[in-house]
Each structure stands twice: as C-alpha cells, then as structure tokens.
Image (cartoon, rainbow, N blue to C red):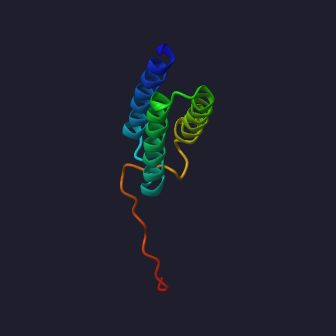
Amino acid sequence: MEKLLNIKKELEDFREEVMLCFRKELPAKEFGATIMMAMVRLHMVEAEIRKTRNLEERRRLISEFNSRKDTIEKRLCAPGKRKSRLFEVSEPRHRRAVSGMR
C-alpha cells in the first residue's frame, strides 16, 4: 500500500515539474499536445496500478509507468533540449519581406 502512495505522490510531483517546464518556455503546439496526452496516459497507468490485485500485472504496470515517465522527462526537461525547435520563442519573430527589386 505504501508503494501505491509513493507512485501517486511521484506522479503529482512529476506533473508539477512538467508544468514548471511549460511555464519556463512555451512548447510548440504539437509537442505540448503530445506531452499532455502522455501525461494523461501516465495518470491512467497509475489508476490501473491502484485497481489491480494481480501482482504480476502490477509489476508490469509499474514498469510501464516508470518507462513512460522517463521518456517524458527526457523529451521535455533534458538539458539543452529547451532551446530546440520543440519550444517556441516567446517574443514574436519578424521576417523581412524579400523582393526581387533592389
């Protein structure tokens, strides 16, 4: 039972960490949506862990939970990844109009 409480707490802490990353830099629309869907699936796995009574199934789900969490963590908050194209720049970008005339 204590392990289940730890997973729930771990998920809550991780959700806060993800939101902090989102507040620091706004992710690109597609990337942000993908991360949110991955977080929803992580919550679903956590709920399945709480419901199951089968120890083998619980081990499999805990492994899936850890794997998914690690994947999200690597994609979102890895050092150096924040400056990649996955995140939009906060200030507007201005493009110069290119004309054939000089």
Q: Position of residue 28 (x, y in %)?
A: 44, 53
Left or right of residue 36, residue 60 in this image: right
Q: Quadrant of residue 96?
A: bottom left
Seen from the viewer's position, the closer of residues 14 and 65 is 65
Seen from the viewer's position, the closer of residues 6 and 89 is 6
- Which residue is situated farthest in the bottom direction here? 101
Give me the residue at 42% from left, 21% from top: 9
Q: Position of residue 56 (x, y in %)?
A: 63, 29
Q: Position of residue 99 (x, y in %)?
A: 46, 82
Give me the residue at 46% from left, 57% from top: 30
Q: Position of residue 85 (x, y in %)?
A: 53, 53
Give me the residue at 53% from left, 44% from top: 83
Q: Quadrant of residue 19?
A: top left
Above or below 102: residue 79: above
How many labels sit on residues?
0
- Which residue is situated farthest in the front direction here? 53
Seen from the viewer's position, the closer of residues 73 and 49 is 49
- Which residue is situated farthest in the top direction here? 2
Above or below 28: residue 8: above
Q: Quadrant of residue 81?
A: top right
